[in-house]
């Protein structure tokens, strides 16, 4: 549990170094990157941030990467219901719009950070000085499907890292490059 003493230590560290106090977890399986977003805090991404999705895969490559069964007639019917794609089109590239939307909603590093942080208890009730102040965003304008989360200040980054360690989550927070 995060203590008032930790909050005081983190604030003091930030004043002295102009950096968040980020303890290292005993094991690291994932890295949460932070990027200075000027007046809006610090953008968080699970993995290095990039705005561009990887090249558009074929439907078959996508099904394989997602563990989606696509070999049998029953599989083909399920895929038709979910994606409106028949087996004759599995080796064609996915629709670029669908791929871009999926990136913004599911597979991109900002969307992954959003989903991860939305799914965990980040600490005491809102308003507590021991809770990281996170701001969750869903689209910047109509038609924008992107998801992202900002930590509002360096103290929030420090508190978030401490809370991840407290939850025994093997995630390390680092400054993005």
Image (cartoon, grey):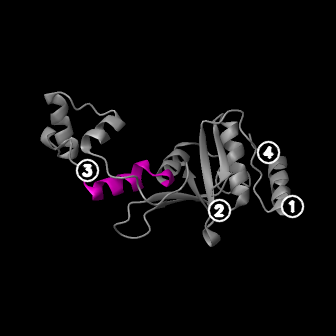
Q: Nearer the viewer, mark 1 or mark 2?
A: 1
Report if residue 96 lies within the magenta region.
yes
The mark closer to the camera, 2 or 4, is: 2
User: At numbered mark 4, what does the secondary structure look like: helix, strand or loop?
Assistant: loop
**x and y, in percent, of residue 22 in the image:** 74, 48
Between the residue at mark 1 and the residue at mark 3, the CA separation in whole angstroms equals 51 Å
Left or right: 78 as drawn, with respect to 106: left
Q: 26 and 122: which one is in front?
A: 26
Point out the image quarter for the N terminus: top right
Q: Is residue 123 magenta-colored?
A: no
Alpha-carbon span between mark 4 and mark 1: 20 Å
What are the residue bounds of the magenta stretch? 94-110
Please provide percent x and percent y for residue 158: 73, 51
Q: Nearer the viewer, mark 1 or mark 3?
A: 3
Of mark 4 and mark 3, the one earlier in the sequence is: 4
Residue placed under numbered mark 4 in the picture: 3
Residue topped by disc 3: 94
Q: Is residue 27 left or right of residue 64?
A: right
The quadrant holding residue 86 is top left
Disc 3, SS? loop
Secondary-structure class at tag 1: helix
Q: Position of residue 100 (x, y in %)?
A: 35, 57
Residue at position x 68%, y 43% in the image = 163
Which residue was labeled with disc 2?
152
| Mark 1 → mark 2, Cα distance in angstroms | 19 Å
Mark 3 vs mark 2: in front: 3
Residue at left 83%, top 60%? 17
Q: Quadrant of residue 63?
A: top left
């Amino acid at each position: 549990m995060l203590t008032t003493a930790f909050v005081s230590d983190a604030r003091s560290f930030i004043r002295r170094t102009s950096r968040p106090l980020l303890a290292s977890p005993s094991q690291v399986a994932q890295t949460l990157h932070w990027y200075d977003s000027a007046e809006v805090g610090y953008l968080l991404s699970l993995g290095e941030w990039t705005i561009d999705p990887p090249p558009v895969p074929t439907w078959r490559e996508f099904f394989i990467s997602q563990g989606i069964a696509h070999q049998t007639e029953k599989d083909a019917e399920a895929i038709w219901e979910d994606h409106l794609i028949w087996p004759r089109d599995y080796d064609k590239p996915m629709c670029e719009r669908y791929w871009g939307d999926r990136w913004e909603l599911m597979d991109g590093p900002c969307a992954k950070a959003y989903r991860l942080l939305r799914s965990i208890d980040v600490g005491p009730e809102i308003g507590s000085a021991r809770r990281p102040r996170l701001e969750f965003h869903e689209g910047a304008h109509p038609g924008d499907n992107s998801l992202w989360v900002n930590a509002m200040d360096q103290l929030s980054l420090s508190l978030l890292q401490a809370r991840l360690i407290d939850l025994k989550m093997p995630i390390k927070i680092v400054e993005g490059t």
